[in-house]
Image (cartoon, rainbow, N blue to C red):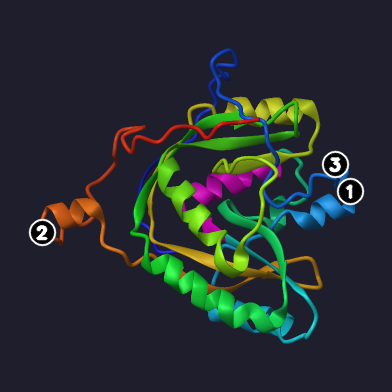
Amino acid sequence: MAAKNDRVNAGGQRARAASKASAPGVEPGVAVDAPAGSAAAASAEPAFAGDTAATNVEPAATAVDSGEAITVGVAMSIPAPFSEVLDAVRASSGDPLATFIPAHLTLLGPTEIDPAGVAEVEIWLGEVAARHAPFRVHLRGTGTFRPVTEVVFVAVAAGISECERLAGDVRRGPLARDLHYPYHPHVTIAHDVPTAALDRVYAELDDFEALFTVDQFTLYVHGADGRWRPLRDFKLTAERLDDAASGGGGGDRGGSAPGSDGASVPPTP
């Protein structure tokens, strides 16, 4: 994904356990009733590929042309060099899915559709993308969904409200679906690994920070081999409010202060 990168800080200070925010929920894409560590759980989490090159389009198209019901997902990839740090930490945790799941922010977890409806979905997502402008995301520190699910993640400090609005818009029309928990944007760095590994990565990325601009999202298709492949990218093309206020051409104004978007953490059950 094209993105402007500002900085990355991936140190290893001890976690501030008493003050860390955690939100109960489930990893987007993992079925609530799938036993932890089971094949069903492993295949349910979107293995979103970070590379949307043309070489990946044909396999995705093949899945669509199979004539059978297909499973799609929508996500925003994390740009390098941040993704490289996050991917390496996830792999170091022993997470067996790390190789197949580059760092991403999920907008829509696995959703089954009729392949005949793919064109309608693409039209819908194009309309969604046209309603949203590129926005800044600030990733900072770690959080966890424990004890509800064995997940440690890097938290979204700014850009939460934009992620929420975009995800809510995606999950309408032909992709309308109910959620088991309120949407909570995050980047998973360990899932269903031993407690010691969860604790280690939680502490290791305690002072991680990344600032970048999201300017597109991607529609993925789940293949028979268990991999998710990009089918199509959708550019966010609406005008930014700050650009409009400045008469256009304002461009990216650099790193905004954490929480400057007025976002708050979604309510939890």
Q: Please name which of the two marks, 2 or 3, marks the residue nearer to the observer.
A: 2
Residue 247: numbered disc: 2
Quote the CA–CA distance across marks 1 and 3. Answer: 5 Å
Sequence-wise, which precedes: disc 2 or disc 3? 3
Quadrant in the picture for residue 211: top left
Q: Position of residue 242 (x, y in %)?
A: 20, 51
Q: Which residues are magenta?
A: 75-92
Q: Residue at point 60% right, 69% down?
A: 174
Q: Residue at point 86% right, 44% down?
A: 37
- Dot 2 lies on which element? loop
Quadrant where the N terminus sits is: bottom left
The residue indicated by pointer 1 is 38
Say few, some or many: other residues with alpha carbon within 10 Å of mark 1 (under 14 / 14 to 19 / 20 or more): few
Quote the CA–CA distance across marks 2 and 3. Answer: 52 Å
Q: Residue at point 60% right, 25% down?
A: 203
Say few, some or many: other residues with alpha carbon within 10 Å of mark 3 (under 14 / 14 to 19 / 20 or more): some
Quote the CA–CA distance across marks 1 and 2. Answer: 54 Å
Task: State if disc 3 and disc 1 touch (CB < 8 Å).
Answer: yes
Q: Main SS type for the magenta part?
A: helix
Is 119 above or below relative to 166?
Answer: below
Is 187 above or below relative to 64?
Answer: above
The residue indicated by pointer 3 is 36
Quadrant where the C terminus sits is: top right
Q: Position of residue 185 (x, y in %)?
A: 54, 43
Query: Is residue 85 at least partly visible in the picture?
Result: yes
Amino acid residing under circle 3: Ala
Q: Please name which of the two marks, 1 or 2, marks the residue nearer to the observer.
A: 2
Is 235 above or below relative to 41?
Answer: below
As drawn, is 31 to the left or to the right of 18? Answer: right
Foreground residue among 29 and 8: 29
Q: Position of residue 4 (x, y in %)?
A: 34, 55
Amino acid residing under circle 1: Ser
